[in-house]
Image (tube, helix red, strand yellow):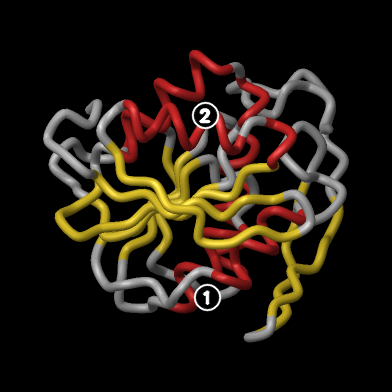
């Protein structure tokens, strides 16, 4: 796990940039990463799994929640060039990296912003996320309740969570709070959870 608490606004560790590869069936992408952001040493196995199995993204406003340096965001943007991808993170270093990586790839449809930088009236056609489980259960529940509650009618959230870090209990919490949750797949200890708003009581 990266030092400096990658979920802090300003990482406490100094910069030490490096280049990593995101290898997917539909292409290989080079990305710049840095210390103090999630998966600085290389694209996380859960993220790769998610990007290998999610369906093609719909058109509209799309969300990468906890974008880090942008492997999910740039994949969304590449696969849905007519859509707007909102790449959201509290980590300022991560947002800078995500912005640079999108620009280097010529992806003009990525908006890298802190949580309050997304206009309140936007509803998301899809949300793809490898959520920050280690931020703590209370903060994680608040985060997911807030953003999954902004799915558009018919929209779907795709989450990847390690089983031993509470994937099944998280699925139970989401179900209890107004979401429909299905296990869309499982591989090497990771769960792919498919989430939709099941009722108007889903937390905002």
Foreground disc of the pair 2, 1: 2
The quarter of the image holding the N terminus is top right
| Residue in view at x 25 percent, y 48 percent | 151
Q: Residue at x 63, y 26 (%)?
A: 7
Residue 18's spot in the image, x, y percent?
86, 53
Task: Please indicate whether residue 42 sits to the left or right of residue 166 in the image.
Answer: right
User: Which element is circle 2 on?
Assistant: loop
Examine the rendering and report whether any part of residue 200 can be seen: yes
Q: Name the foreground residue: 132 vs 154.
A: 154
State the SS at label 1.
Answer: loop
Q: Find disc 2 in the rendering and name its residue.
A: 90
Q: Residues within 10 Å of mark 1 (few under 14, many from 20)?
A: few
Q: Residue 106 bears which disc, if any? A: 1
Residue 96 placed where, x, y %?
Answer: 59, 44
Q: Is residue 94 above or below residue 30?
A: above
- Which badge, 2 or 1, comes first in the chain's sequence? 2
Q: How many numbered circles are shown?
A: 2
Q: Residue 43 placed where, x, y %?
A: 76, 56
**Crowding near pointer 2: few (<14 within 10 Å), some, many (20+)?**
many
Q: Is residue 164 left or right of residue 148?
A: right
User: Is residue 63 visible to us here?
Assistant: no
Compared with residue 128, is residue 104 higher up or lower down, i.e. above or below?
below
The circle on residue 147 is: none
Determine the image quadrant of residue 14: top right
User: Which of these two is toward me, 174 or 89?
Assistant: 174
Marks 2/1: CA–CA distance: 24 Å
Q: Residue at x 62, y 30 (%)?
A: 133
Q: Nearer the viewer, residue 121 or 124?
A: 124
Judged left or right of residue 60, residue 108 is right
Image quarter in which the C terminus is found: top left
């Amino acid at each position: 796990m990266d030092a400096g608490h990658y979920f802090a606004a300003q990482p406490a560790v100094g910069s030490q940039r490096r280049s990593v590869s995101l290898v997917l069936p539909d292409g290989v992408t080079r990305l710049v990463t840095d210390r103090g952001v999630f998966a600085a040493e290389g694209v996380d196995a859960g993220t790769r799994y998610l990007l290998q199995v999610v369906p093609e993204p719909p058109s509209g406003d799309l969300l990468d929640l906890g974008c880090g340096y942008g492997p999910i965001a740039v994949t969304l943007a590449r696969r849905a060039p007519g859509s707007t991808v909102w790449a959201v993170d509290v980590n300022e270093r991560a947002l800078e990296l995500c912005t640079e990586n999108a620009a280097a790839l010529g992806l003009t449809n990525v908006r890298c912003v802190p949580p309050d930088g997304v206009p309140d009236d936007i509803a998301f056609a899809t949300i793809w996320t490898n959520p920050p489980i280690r931020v703590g259960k209370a903060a994680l529940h608040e985060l997911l309740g807030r953003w999954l509650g902004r799915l558009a009618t018919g929209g779907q959230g795709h989450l990847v969570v390690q089983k031993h870090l509470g994937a099944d209990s998280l699925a139970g919490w989401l179900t209890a709070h107004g979401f429909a949750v299905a296990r869309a797949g499982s591989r090497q200890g990771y769960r792919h959870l498919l989430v939709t708003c099941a009722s108007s009581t889903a937390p905002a």
